[in-house]
Image (cartoon, helix red, strand yellow):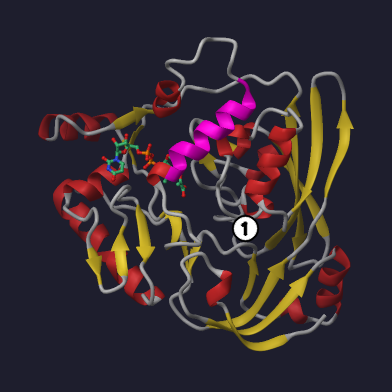
Amino acid sequence: MLTQQNYNLSQLNTFGVDATAEKLVEVETLDDLFELSDHGLLKENPVLFLGQGSNLLFTRHFPGLVILNRLTGRKVLEEDDDFVFLRVSAGESWPELVDYTVSRGWGGLENLSLIPGSAGAAPVQNIGAYGVEIKDVLDCVEAFDLQTGELKTFSIKHCRLGYRTSIFKTTSKGRYLITSILIKLAKIPVLNLSYKPLKEYFNRYPSGTIGICEVSEAVKAIRRSKLPEPAEIGNAGSFFKNPLVSSGKINQLKSQFPGIPFFTMDNDKYKIAAGWLIEQCGWKGKRIGDAGVYDKQALVLVNYGKATGKQIFDLSQQIVESVHEKFSITLEREVTVI
Ligand code: EPU
């Protein structure tokens, strides 16, 4: 394996911002990881495991080792009349994986079509869209422990997956490199059309004519109508999480802002649409230099060309402040800021 110095990361993040890494190495096999470990390279601080770079914002030079995750491979480990257990290496492309499973007629991932990123990154923030999260199909995660140099298997329970969170983003942040995921897919798919725009899309379809291919195509069409294509406009999807508030807070907000969109969650919590909060503060479609707020979805920050990570971060900070001022809600970033 070749370790490269002062590596330019602009092609390795979907925001397309300029940044460099002190060192970069590409891993294609588990043996590559063990070799790095044997040479003591993984004890270097900090280490960043980079897949497709679709959920991060570089705001500075990275003073450590970037490990480019190029672990590939998909394998059916077990199957019966009802289910398929598929093991997927962490460096596999997520959208290609979804297309593959849909083409085989295996249900479970169709609502997660076209999400940019790698399979290994999916459990880190429990990716979700259109009523489905990876936690609904995940069986376990295999990861390399930077502290012990060993591989470890995490059951779904141990991953503690929640709304855009897991132990890999919280209590065990920086300790494990996810090397593969095991997912359980259904041979007799059960469709999830609970998400309103998806239900509306199929309004005029006769029942019995919708399968996972149609759902996947619908999700792609809805995403394309709202979200910018990273190859055309730099972005990392939703920049912030939708905030969760208490019943007291939602009642207060409803009386002050009757149109506020929210969803009722478990444990007496309410999820508010952050895109709406940002739009109400006048940010939708705004642009400061080349950093901007997407005009079709205010939750997405974009790089129109030459914005720096710092300029995008500063814009996000101004948004946090104005949402706090108007609604007394502090938005949390979904994107990892480096
Ligand atoms: N809205 C506005 N203005 C906007 C954007 C949204 O008023 O500019 C309001 C609308 O009322 C809309 C509601 O917000 O009905 C929800 O918007 P949308 O359906 O676009 O979903 P979201 O809550 O903004 C979340 C995920 C997306 C995921 C979609 C669909 C988060 C942080 N984001 O967005 O995930 O695709 O739901 O399930 O939960 C991502 O994480 O990168 C991502 C794109």
On the image, which quarter does residue 84 sit in? top right
Q: Residue at x 36, y 68 (%)?
A: 304
Q: Is residue 87 left or right of residue 112?
A: right
Q: Which amino acid type corresponds to the residue marked 1 in the rendered image?
A: Ser
* Residue placed most toward the observer, 271 or 266: 271
The secondary structure that dominates the magenta segment is: helix
Quadrant where the image shows the N terminus: bottom right
The magenta span reads 211-224
Q: Residue at x 77, y 47 (%)?
A: 88
**For residue 176, above or below residue 251:** below
Q: Is residue 166 left or right of residue 328?
A: right
Residue 173 is situated, as x and y percent measured from the top left of the image, at 59, 61
* Residue placed most toward the observer, 28 or 62: 28
Ligand 1 rendered quadrant: top left
* Residue placed most toward the observer, 240 or 212: 212
Residue 160 is situated, as x and y percent measured from the top left of the image, at 60, 42
Residue at the left extreme of this rendering: 256
Residue 105 is situated, as x and y percent measured from the top left of the image, at 73, 27
Q: Is residue 183 left or right of residue 268?
A: right
Residue at the top extreme of this rendering: 207
Q: Is residue 266 left or right of residue 289?
A: right
Residue 332 is situated, as x and y percent measured from the top left of the image, at 37, 54
Residue 222 on the magenta span: yes
Say which element carries label 1.
Answer: loop
On the image, which quarter does residue 222 sit in? top left
Task: Name the residue that disc number 1 marks.
Answer: 172
Residue 188 on the magenta span: no
Q: Residue at x 86, y 38 (%)?
A: 76
